Image: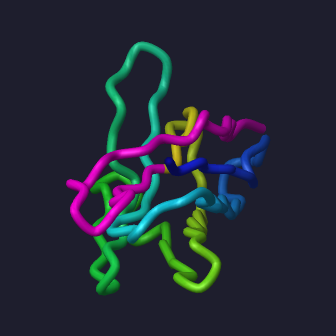
């Protein structure tokens, strides 16, 4: 199984920056994609940013140009740097990992417990 530990959420003023980190641990064969999703109250969970094992990155429309995702394969970590934050970025941010437990296993999705990001003055 894969366990995910998120860190870096909190309260930030509009225009400020925040860095989220997520570390994956456990017994697994391979991590494929890693990334972040977010969900605000009463809204669906949306893609923030995802990075695959070959380094391909995808950003949600609402954060593109203001966010940078990076990945440390040696440490099984993914980071999300968010700049010029806006009140509408307020949400619970969830770490996402797509991984295989064994070489014969299909790719499974794993989710962190979520970290709150609040953008407010």
Which residue is nearer to you in this view: 102 or 19?
A: 102
Quadrant of the rendered image containing residue 105: bottom left
Name the residue located 33 percent from the left edge and 60 percent from the top edge: 100
**Colour scheme of this structure image?**
rainbow
Name the residue located 36 percent from the left edge and 63 percent from the top edge: 50
Q: Residue furthest top?
A: 42
Examine the rendered structure and indicate whether residue 23 appears above or below residue 40: below
Task: State yes or no: residue 17 in magenta.
Answer: no
Q: Is residue 26 left or right of residue 64?
A: right
Name the residue located 59 percent from the left edge and 48 percent from the top edge: 3
Which residue is nearer to you in this view: 73 or 86?
A: 73
Residue 75 picture location, percent across and down: 64, 78
Which residue is nearer to you in this view: 101 or 24?
A: 101
Residue 49 picture location, percent across and down: 39, 61
Q: Which residues are magenta?
A: 96-121
Residue 91 picture location, percent across and down: 55, 33
Q: Is residue 16 left or right of residue 102?
A: right
Q: Is residue 112 left or right of residue 47?
A: right
Examine the rendered structure and indicate whether residue 95 appears above or below residue 17: above
Image quadrant where one finds the C terminus:
top right
Name the residue located 35 percent from the left edge and 52 percent from the top edge: 62
Examine the rendered structure and indicate whether residue 48 appears above or below residue 64: above
């Amino acid at each position: 199984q894969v366990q995910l530990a998120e860190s870096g959420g909190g309260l930030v003023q509009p225009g400020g920056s925040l860095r989220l980190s997520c570390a994956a641990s456990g017994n697994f064969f391979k991590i494929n994609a890693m990334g972040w999703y977010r969900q605000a109250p009463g809204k669906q969970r949306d893609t923030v940013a995802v990075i695959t094992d070959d380094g391909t990155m995808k950003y949600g429309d609402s954060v593109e140009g203001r966010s940078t995702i990076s990945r440390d394969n040696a440490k099984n970590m993914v980071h999300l740097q968010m700049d010029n934050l806006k009140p509408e970025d307020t949400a619970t941010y969830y770490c996402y990992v797509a991984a295989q437990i064994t070489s014969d296993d299909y790719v499974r999705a794993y989710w962190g417990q979520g970290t709150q990001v609040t953008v407010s003055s």
